[in-house]
Amino acid sequence: MPDRSLSEKLFRAAKEVIPGGVNSPVRAFRNVGGEPFFAQRARGARVWDVDGNEMIDYVGTWGPAILGHAPSVVIDAVTQAAKEGVSFGIPNRHEVEIARMIRDFVPSVEKVRMVNSGTEATMSAIRLARGYTGRDKIVKFEGCYHGHVDSLLVAAGSGALTFGQPDSAGIPSDFAKLTICLPFNRPDLLQELFEKQGDEIAAVILEPVPANAGLYLPKTGFLQLLRDLTSKHGTVLIFDEVMTGFRVAKGGVQEKTGITPDLTAMGKVIGGGLPVGAFGGKAEIMDHLAPLGPVYQAGTLSGNPLAMAAGIAQLKEMERRDGWNLLEQIGQSFETAVRDALSALGRDLAFHRIGSMFCLFFTEGPVDNLDDVKRSDFEAFRKFFWAALDRGVYFAPSQYEAGFISLAHGESEIAKTAEVTCEALKIALA
Ligand code: KE4
């Protein structure tokens, strides 16, 4: 068992001054029990805790670390930008450059507004859709998580699900009732809803590949049906690609599927690890934003030069190395290792992967939506998580999260992970 005494000491101190000792609930390890470790430093595919324990990291700061942690191209870009100033609150050239890159990577994004988190991105996209359509109702899917937005913390995933709080306290019922929640991958229920209320619905927002209740894929035709129904009824279709964007493909899920939303929420990868979100889409809709139009949205640090420089450097490096193709190759070798471990144990657990995002469910398939995920053996997951962590591999501390592979996960990391996964599965499934 690794020594984690300094992390324990820090956690005790943290809990005295920070609610739950964390600045984001999922970091508290509540889904797996025990206490979180405290990071000392991270580089490439590895993270070291304050007690000096080294781990191969498959959380990757929940998505941004697509090149691996602290890539030199990002550090150099941020250092250079900082020499000119850390924040202006004045338009700067970095904002124009990253906006042009986002537009070029994601053709459905004709105009984009930078913000400071994925939450801000989805919150702003919803407000914009309501302002553009003049309608109030919105649709989301059970288990999808779009940040801690009042109107979207309804049947939400990720940390909200981890704590059994898919419907947060503090949200007025008058507010929540404007959010209609459907199970994912149920075209029948979608069709029925739109037949009855389609012309009253401002927007449908979804993770086109849900990855906040584990990771599962849209069934064939589901996204196309969504696109057809929203187009027919003048409803704004919003893809929340905060996690999948610039990761599962250069242009995200919309590039892989060819289904084009009206608006896209983005974040994580485009910030290179610094606080960034963005939302963008059709100019006709985006031009309803202040100062052009009646929908207000603002942010002191939006377009911050350091965050922009980090995102530009990361996107350029991904493009230079054709990172998406490399990630697919690494993802395939990772998947082979996991499936070999499962077959050696004679267990047919559901393992889902799209590019460099994955999830091992402690249940047999099919896993098509949140109800299927809830069949998982959470005790076995807990044992697996700690057995892997104690052997130097850090997976996401919740069955309701996805894993992330980076360009820094080389052959040695995958080989070590295969060995540890095998041992951890034996312990978890014994
Ligand atoms: P942030 O506000 O946390 O930057 O982004 C919210 C968000 C929006 N949309 C999607 C699809 C997301 O996955 C997220 C945030 N992702 C979680 C990980 N599942 C962040 C981790 C955390 O809450 O600490």
Image (cartoon, grey):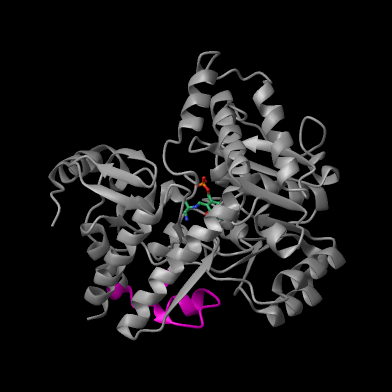
Compared with 293, 147 (above or below) is: below
Which quadrant holds residue 165?
bottom left
Image quadrant holding the C terminus, namely: bottom left
Which of these two is toward me, 280 or 159? Answer: 280
Q: Is residue 198 magenta?
A: no
Residue at image coords 80%, 70%: 229
Q: In this orientation, which residue lies closer to the viewer: 400 or 79? A: 79
**Which residue appears at 45% of the width and 64% of the height?**
333
Image-quadrant location for residue 221: bottom right
Q: Residue furthest top?
A: 84
Q: Return the x and y of residue 361 as percentages of the image width and height.
A: 41, 74
Question: Would you say residue 49 is visible in this rendering?
Answer: yes
Part of the protein shown in magenta: 360-380
Which image quadrant for residue 226? bottom right
Q: Can residue 166 be seen from the camera position used here?
A: no
**For residue 166, above or below residue 187:** above
Where does residue 278 sit, x and y in percent of width and height?
Answer: 64, 41
90 left or right, relative to 168:
right
Identify the residue shown where x is 54% and y is 70%.
216
Quarter containing the N terminus: bottom left
Horizontally, is 393 left or right of 408 in the view?
A: left
* Image position of 155 with respect to 11: above or below: below
Percent across and percent down for residue 370 are 51, 74
Rendered residue at 48%/48% (across/down): 407
Q: Is residue 370 magenta?
A: yes
